[in-house]
Image (cartoon, grey):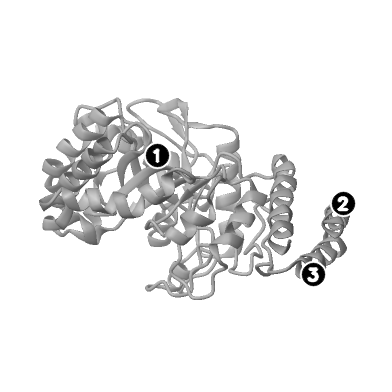
């Protein structure tokens, strides 16, 4: 009886939260769900939070079975990560990719919507040429393994890159890759074209502003009204740096012979706190950056050079992660604190359950509290229904 009441409660709760989704700004945007922390809520609670935010696209940095199981039978689409540590072995022995998929993907894909495998993260940033040379063979091994399983049309294979591999990004029409990486990028782009896979970038205008605050107008990086810049070669006007970075990458890709590959933003965000030398890291600027970005996503804006292609964005990140190494900013990119409270206001108000309910009595107590706090008459209807069971 307790299990039935518990199941009923969660089903009705999720259905109710979905009726609030049209008031959320989450639709159309993805979120990076990092877990380098020791104080995060359980994946089951996060599933309720994301449902209440109407966020239906999530990027993981691994293939955590607890997360994938908790989102079973939901409408959430997942990008799952295959870490850099796997690449060399998979490039040498393709059966390693088959084993990884059988262990990490197959147990979940019938119930959890997994649409993409991100093979490696920011490989070129490592400057490890052994690792860099392993990327494409590993991606091919994963794609072949998906094909063997009959999943190559259901699950896309790609990788995520930092913008450090660009030699030039200004003006956007002259975007180009560093010469040393072109021998690796040319065949990589050919493979993306062959399998019709998007090219993912992690783009952070914050870094450009932090490094040159006197040269880079704060309004230009925060999507605020500003004079912007005009590309002298195309006469296209840019009023924000993120779109200029994306178009610079499109130019670099075109210079290697491809205009058939879509660029998507797998990470972007702004820290709410930073070290003394991390100029611009503040909750006010983070709210402006992410809030304005979410509005652009809602408006289905494209970049000046690709106006017909709405930007595809995964915001970094869902939570502040207290165990991330590096400067203070690394631990303060989250939209939410681990207790579910917003770090700042960008129009996203979600619901994070306080506990995992274990009995009918506990469920009734929590619903009473929920009704008192939220003032929702529907909670009373649910409560009455549970009492009758």
Q: Residues within 10 Å of mark 1 (few under 14, many from 20)?
A: some
Q: Nearer the viewer, residue 191 or 274?
A: 191
Q: Which quadrant of the figure has residue 234?
A: top left
Residue 301 position in % (x across, y down): 53, 32
* Count of numbered labels shown in the rendering: 3
Q: Earlier in the sequence, mark 2 or mark 3?
A: 3
> Tag 3's secondary structure?
helix
Residue 361's tag is 3
- Quadrant showing the N terminus: bottom right
Q: Is residue 194 above or below residue 350?
A: above
Depth check, mark 2 against mark 3: the one in front is 3
Q: Is residue 69 above or below residue 234?
A: below
Judging by the rendered image, the residue that carries numbered circle 1 is: 264
Q: Residues within 10 Å of mark 3 (few under 14, many from 20)?
A: some
Residue 381's tag is 2
- Quadrant showing the C terminus: bottom right
């Amino acid at each position: 009886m307790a299990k039935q009441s518990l199941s009923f409660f969660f089903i009705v709760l999720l259905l109710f939260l979905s009726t609030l989704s049209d008031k959320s700004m989450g639709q159309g945007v993805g979120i990076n769900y990092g877990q380098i922390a020791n104080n995060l809520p359980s994946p089951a609670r996060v599933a309720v939070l994301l449902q209440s935010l109407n966020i239906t696209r999530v990027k993981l940095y691994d293939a955590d079975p607890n997360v994938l199981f908790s989102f079973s039978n939901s409408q959430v689409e997942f990008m799952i990560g295959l870490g850099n540590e796997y690449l060399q072995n998979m490039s040498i022995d393709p059966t390693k990719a088959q084993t990884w998929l059988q262990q990490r993907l197959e147990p979940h894909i019938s119930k959890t919507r997994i649409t993409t495998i991100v093979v490696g993260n920011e490989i070129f940033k490592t400057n490890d040429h052994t690792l860099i040379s392993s990327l494409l063979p590993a991606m091919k091994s994963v794609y072949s393994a998906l094909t063997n399983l009959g999943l190559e049309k259901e699950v896309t294979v790609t990788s995520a890159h930092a913008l450090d591999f660009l030699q030039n990004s200004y003006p956007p029409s002259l975007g180009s890759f560093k010469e040393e990486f072109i021998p690796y990028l040319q065949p990589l782009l050919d493979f993306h074209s062959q399998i019709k896979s998007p090219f993912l970038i992690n783009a952070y205008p914050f870094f450009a502003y932090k490094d040159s605050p006197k040269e880079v107008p704060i309004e230009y990086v925060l999507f605020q009204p500003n004079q912007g810049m005009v590309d002298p070669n195309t006469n296209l006007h840019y009023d924000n740096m993120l779109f200029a970075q994306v178009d610079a990458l499109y130019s670099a890709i075109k210079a290697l012979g491809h205009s058939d590959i879509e660029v998507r933003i797998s990470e972007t965000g702004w820290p709410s706190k930073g070290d003394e030398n991390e100029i611009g890291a503040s909750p006010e600027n983070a709210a402006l950056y992410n809030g304005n970005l979410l509005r652009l996503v809602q408006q289905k804006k494209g970049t000046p050079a690709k106006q017909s292609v709405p930007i595809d964005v995964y915001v970094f990140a869902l939570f502040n992660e207290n165990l991330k190494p590096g400067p203070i900013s690394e631990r303060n990119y989250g939209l939410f604190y681990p207790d579910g409270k917003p770090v700042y206001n960008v129009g996203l108000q979600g619901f994070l359950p306080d506990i995992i309910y274990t009995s009918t009595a506990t469920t009734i107590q929590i619903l009473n509290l929920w009704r008192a706090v939220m003032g929702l008459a529907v909670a009373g209807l649910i409560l009455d229904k549970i009492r009758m069971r």
